[in-house]
Amino acid sequence: MPSIFTKIISGEIPSYKIAETDQFLAFLDVFPLVHGHVLVVPKKETDFIFDIEDAELSEMILFAKKVAKAQKAAIVCKRIGVAVIGLEVPHAHIHLVPMNTANDVNFTQPKIKPTAAELNAIAEKIKSKL
């Protein structure tokens, strides 16, 4: 059964896309820790991030770096936190989280609930910095 991320990649589920290549997709987390929380996923469904081939994983990190730089330019924050948790969806992904304190990347805290209009505005702002 395809993961929710595979369904987002195929367009079955809508998303707030930030950046896309033939291999990767970056989109806003719709249940974010903070505004501007982005997920970076490989288009090839792989459960565990360290099962991704070395060359592809390197490219994924470089893709995430480009997105993170755009986030930092678009969102007021001290830095972009990076996390790989891998428990909630069986599809490798990197969380890019704008942060001002360590608690901003605390995955046990309640998620915020931005509106569609807020998500759209944030996505456009980040995309404008790519």
Image: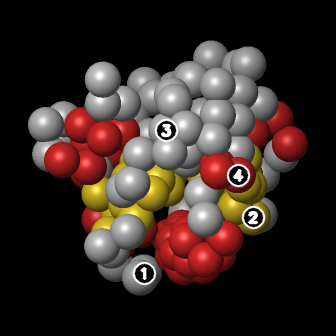
Q: Earlier in the sequence, mark 4 or mark 1?
A: 4
Q: Which residue is mark 1?
A: 129
Which quadrant of the figure has residue 33?
top right
Q: Earlier in the sequence, mark 3 or mark 2?
A: 2
**Hey, what amino acid is under mark 4?**
Phe
Residue 121 at least partly seen: no
In the displayed structure, 78 sits above or below 33; it is below
**Hey, what amino acid is under mark 1?**
Lys
Which residue occupies 46% across, 53% down? 41
Q: What separation in Å lies between label 3 and label 2 (alpha carbons)?
A: 25 Å
SS class, disc 4: helix
Q: Position of residue 28 (x, y in %)?
A: 40, 48
Q: Position of residue 22 (x, y in %)?
A: 30, 73
Query: Circles 4 and 1: CB distance less than 8 Å?
Result: no
Q: Which residue is mark 2?
A: 79
Residue 12 at least partly seen: yes
Frontmost residue, 39 versus 109: 39
Q: What separation in Å lies between label 1 and label 3 (alpha carbons)?
A: 27 Å
In the displayed structure, 125 sits above or below 29; it is below
Please give the count of numbered marks on the rendered protein. Answer: 4
In the displayed structure, 70 sits above or below 113; it is below
Residue 50: image tag:
4
In this rendering, which labeled residue sits more in front, label 1 or label 3? 3
Q: Earlier in the sequence, mark 4 or mark 3?
A: 4
Left or right: 8 in relation to 107: left
**Hey, what amino acid is under mark 2?**
Arg
Crowding at dot 3, Cα within 10 Å, few <14 / some 14-19 / many 20+, comes out as: many
Which residue occupies 62% across, 17% down? 110
Q: Earlier in the sequence, mark 2 or mark 4?
A: 4
Left or right: 54 in relation to 128: right
Q: Quadrant of the C terminus?
A: bottom left
